[in-house]
Amino acid sequence: MKTVAAFAGRDFLVLRSYRFALASDFGWGVVNLLVYFFISRLIGLPVEDLGAAAGYFEFVVAGIVASLVLGAVTTETSDRIREEELTGTLEIVVAQPVRAELLALGYAAFPVMFALVRVLLYLVIAITFLDFDAASADWIGVGAVLLASAAGFLALGIVAAAVTIVFKRGGRVADLAVFAMTFLGGALFPISTFPSWLEPLGRMMPTRFAFDGLREALFAGEGWLNDVAVLGGVAAVALPLSLWIFDRAVESQARRLAGAILGSRYEPSTPARGCRLPARRRGPRTRPAEDERNLRPERDRRAFLGAARRGEAAGRDRGGDAGRVRRRA
């Protein structure tokens, strides 16, 4: 857990350094609430289409805050991986002795916590200033539904992060998938108001359990346990599989990085087991003809100097012998 906390603390410090972006993020969220608040004054939907919600504004606020959590565990997780790639720090992180599952949870920890803080802030603003009716809310159920939703859809974000690591792209696919699931799952409009050919597809969306469970917890105070159980089952099946996919992606990136480093320095005679190193191109064994022509004058000069030195040494030897003969005579 220290590794996950370290990643979350780092992401918080990075976000805090962009204070204008942080303030604008909260500001646009409040503007979004106001837009749907005034739209709710113009729309009169039958109460049976809104489920447990007292009005359209309550209905859509529950969808907005649930969508915040779903977006945090999916698109924001893959976006952080992409930022690491662009800044050149992903290779450094991957090279550290950190298990892949902790790496994945570390990247998702801060987006989830930040989304929960935003949910709390938006609910406080809606209840205090916009006549949001939450008198029957079961706040333990609200927290349980939000956490189960985060766990259930975290698998999609981890798979998108793995795709981003391997193929350098994946965030846009996750954005499209999350938008389709939240819209068809009934985040902004009741599924019963969809066209007849689209309504069955909306009821098949797994996001429907997140929206329905949150509305039951906020406005009825009961009936959310079944939705939490479904989301928990999704998490139990999909989360281990997504962590395995992420582990394979990290291992592939580590092998590619190791191969690039080792291949640029030397070529070992026996590569590590399971690690394919890129083949190095060997130079020609014989020098080209033009290189031979360029080296020929240098070799002639060295041969001439060697012969001159040998002749000088031979002359000294002959002079020494003649002197010895004269002395004897």
Image (tube, rainbow, N blue to C red):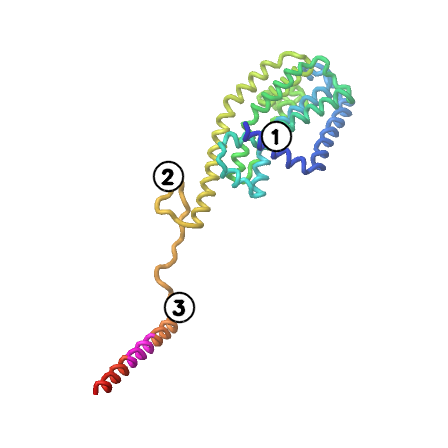
The magenta segment: 306-316
Between 84 and 311, the one nearer to me in the picture = 311
Which secondary structure class fits the magenta region best?
Answer: helix
Disc 1 secondary structure class: helix
Structural distance between the alpha carbons of marks 2 and 1: 37 Å
> Residue sitting at 39 percent across and 72 percent down?
298
Q: Quadrant of the N terminus?
A: top right
Q: Position of residue 162 (x, y in %)?
A: 52, 34
Q: Quadrant of the C terminus?
A: bottom left
Q: Give the labeled residue for mark 3.
A: 290
Q: Give the labeled residue for mark 1.
A: 110
Q: Residue 171 in magenta? A: no
Q: What crowding class fits label 3: few (fewer than 14 Cα within 10 Å), some (14-19), or many (20 or more)?
A: few
Q: Is residue 74 above or below residue 310?
A: above
Between 110 and 289, the one nearer to me in the picture = 110
Q: Specify whether 227 is left or right of 244.
A: right
* Badge 3 vs badge 2, beta-carbon distance below 8 Å: no
Disc 2 secondary structure class: loop
